[in-house]
Amino acid sequence: MEEERDDKTRRRPAWWLFIGLALVAVVLFIPLLRSGSGEETGDVSLQAFAQEVEAGNAERIIIKGDKLILERPDGTEIESRKEEGISAIETLQRLGVSDAALQNVEISVEDEGTSFGDILLGLLGFAPLLLFVVIGFIIWRQFQRSGGGIFGFGKSKPRVTGVDGRRPNVTFGDVAGVEEAKLELQEVVEFLKSPDRFTRLGAHVPKGVLLVGPPGTGKTLLARAVAGEASVPFFSISASEFVEMFVGAGASRVRDLFEKAKTAAPSIIFVDEIDAVGRRRGVGLGGGNDEREQTLNQILVEMDGFETDTNVIVIAATNRADVLDAALLRPGRFDRRVLVDRPDAAGREAILQVHSRGKPLAPEVKLADIAKLTAGFTGADLENLMNEAAILAVRKGHLSIGSADLDEAFERIVAGPERSKKLLSPEERRVVAYHEAGHAFVMESMPDGDPVRKISIVSRGPALGFTMPLPERDRVLRSKEALEDEIAGLLGGRAVEELLCGSITTGAANDLERATALARAMVTQFGMSDDLGLRIFAGGDGVPLTWPPQQRDYAEGTALRIDAEIKGILDRAHDRATALLREHWGTVARLAEALLARETLERPEIEKLLAERDTGTEVPCPDERLLERGSAAATGA
């Protein structure tokens, strides 16, 4: 029934628009009515009318306003119209009718009366004004319906579930991979279900729960699951919906939202992306009168003004907890902070099981293997992976989702769709093949490097080829040696291009960007520089942390030392990669030639090609400078 009412509401503006267009059409038809009125049976010109009177063919003349009607002796009639402002007798005399002819004719004056056409013409004179009124009414109704009416600026428009018998249909069973967060929120569910158990011992209901985590980890889903488990109304709204161009509208909407939630208590208010209004006060361009800050102040007042027996819990989500105002995070407002982090391998497998419901999987599909492959994926990424695999299976005409579909979906998400029409010259294909072989060989040779799962020179997205490592396990901590090995693997492609004796290409642009970012983080954030020590350098990534931009907190000389350290890390990694490639050039060349022949190599083929490592094979273009630097790096100098 609710959906039918919504459909009728959406159709009303169309009906009003149709009525308005009909009025416009009638207004345009007025001249036709006016020109056509009075020109029906027997209409003649005034000259012909006068000739009939002079000839004695008139028994009676009837005058109705400007209309003249002549009745003949045989009962027929003719009509004509005179000019305004002159009498009928004077008109006939001017046209040559004699007084003798007029004396033999009975002349009568009758009331013209009001015809339907005249009434219609009179009413339609107001049509333009009526049309403007109708259009204004439609616009006003649209504003009222969207919450933007003249009386609706201060009204909140949350998405509400759990009212009028409609309960949220999401429970903790639909949420996987965040078991620690579910345990934290289970206590909130108990508060909402049976608050007497806690108030009996003097405990009060927590006023706010802040969900913090990267995008796509399931913060909104968790909030809905809490409402579903507790079977309470759920008021969901984005923080950006509070902020308006009208001063005070945001604060008014906050008050209205909390009043609705208190009326439906016990209930949950969910504010998504709260950092849109919850940022630190005093740093914006608008100062203390900034509309965003007024909205934040109202949220603080409302949360602090709860009575102890009001069972309304505010759940907020953000991925930028570092920018939130301190008053918002103090005890008494957001009492709980729940971390919703990226899932580990077991969590990813559980998430895949949830999102594979209703999707037929082929017998060879093992979700545990997919979970290992998707290290770093969030819940939203895994849902997208399963959906992409299902789409690919349908496109290929499969009856179930197979491992090939999942692999293809994974590569589409990570590297982009395959570009089969990307044509490369033979020399470009050779450079790309050696570039990817260099990456793979250096990654496999590093002590703390990840094994390579797949190498391909098939263009995907912006990349002309890709090397896909497969982490053996989820790593929470990264050592300095592991980061240096990763940088060396990233620079393996550039190093192999230099050893090919051709000019270096733009193919290593993304590799250099990632390697530089890692080296900068090692120096400015992780304290891994022997020269600069343990100090952290704010703004070391070159991006201002606040607005207005803060000044650099270190001297110009220190900046030069930071640049030198970053360059040193990159140079040492490049030298290690070069030395390895030069020493085992035969193996690298065999790997590259296999890529040129097959375009894609999987893990078993890679292991077979790397099983026997050739040593002492000369590179195409020996360079003494590179040889000296590579030897020094290999000996640890």
Image (cartoon, rainbow, N blue to C red):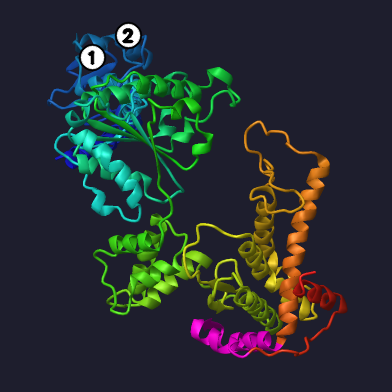
Instruction: Name the residue that disc number 1 marks.
Output: 64
Q: Secondary structure at mark 1?
A: strand
Asked whether residue 355 appears in the rendered view, the answer is yes
Residue occupied by mark 2:
87
Q: Residue at x 17, y 23 (%)?
A: 72
Query: Is 374 in front, or is 444?
Result: 444
**Residue span colored magenta:** 586-612
Residue 306 in percent (x, y) is at 31, 20
Is residue 490 on the magenta stretch? no
In this view, the residue in front, 305 or 140, is 305
Q: Quarter of the image holding residue 7?
A: top left
In the rendered image, the vertical position of residue 329 relative to residue 393, given as above or below: above
Q: As shown in the figure, which amino acid type bears the numbered disc 2?
A: Ser
Q: Main secondary structure of the magenta part?
A: helix
Regarding mark 2 in the picture, which secondary structure is present there?
loop
Position of 21 with respect to 478 (left or right) is left
Amino acid at circle 1 = Lys
Task: Give x and y (percent) for residue 30.
Answer: 32, 28
Local crowd size for mark 2, using a 10 Å CA cut-off: few (<14), some (14–19), many (≥20): few
Indicate the position of residue 33 as horizontal and vertical percent values: 29, 29
- Name the quarter where the N terminus is drawn: top left
Q: Nearer the viewer, residue 234 or 40?
A: 234
**Quadrant in the picture for the C terminus:** bottom right
Q: Residue at x 27, y 26 (%)?
A: 204
